[in-house]
Image (cartoon, helix red, strand yellow):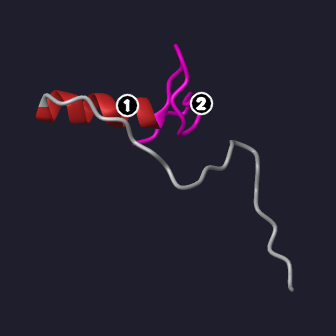
Amino acid sequence: MMEKNSTGWQKQPDKLNIQGNIEKAIERITGEEVNLTASGRTDRGVHALRTSC
């Protein structure tokens, strides 16, 4: 479940974020440190607008 106070996907120092939480969970389960990479990102409050070509 996503936290309401999350700063989004990307890892940021001293901020609640999805990437950091997932990485910590994987490390607890596997014992291995991982660095996840996302293929895209949308900041809170930013929306894509579909236009015709």
Q: Position of residue 46 (x, y in %)?
A: 76, 49
Neighbourhood count class around disc 1 (C-alpha, 10 Å): few under 14, some 14–19, many 20 upward: some
Query: Which residue appears at 34% of the width and 37% of the height?
Result: 22
Amino acid at circle 1:
Asn
Q: Position of residue 38 (x, y in %)?
A: 49, 49
Q: Position of residue 36 (x, y in %)?
A: 39, 41
In screen coordinates, is 20 left or right of 48? left
For residue 37, the mark is none
User: Height in image: 24 above or below 15?
Assistant: below
Dominant secondary structure, magenta: loop
Image-quadrant location for residue 7 = top right
Query: Which residue appears at 59% of the width and 54% of the height?
Result: 40
Q: Nearer the viewer, residue 37 or 48?
A: 37
Give the residue at mark 1. Answer: 21
Neighbourhood count class around disc 2 (C-alpha, 10 Å): few under 14, some 14–19, many 20 upward: some
In the image, farthest residue toward the left: 30
Element under label 2?
loop
Q: Is residue 3 magenta?
A: yes
Element under label 1?
helix
Give the residue at mark 2. Answer: 7
Q: Nearer the viewer, residue 1 or 15?
A: 15
Query: Which residue appears at 54% of the width and 31% of the height?
Result: 6
Q: Magenta segment range?
A: 1-18
Query: Which residue appears at 33% of the width and 33% of the height?
Result: 23
State which quarter of the image contains the C terminus.
bottom right
Q: Is residue 19 magenta?
A: no
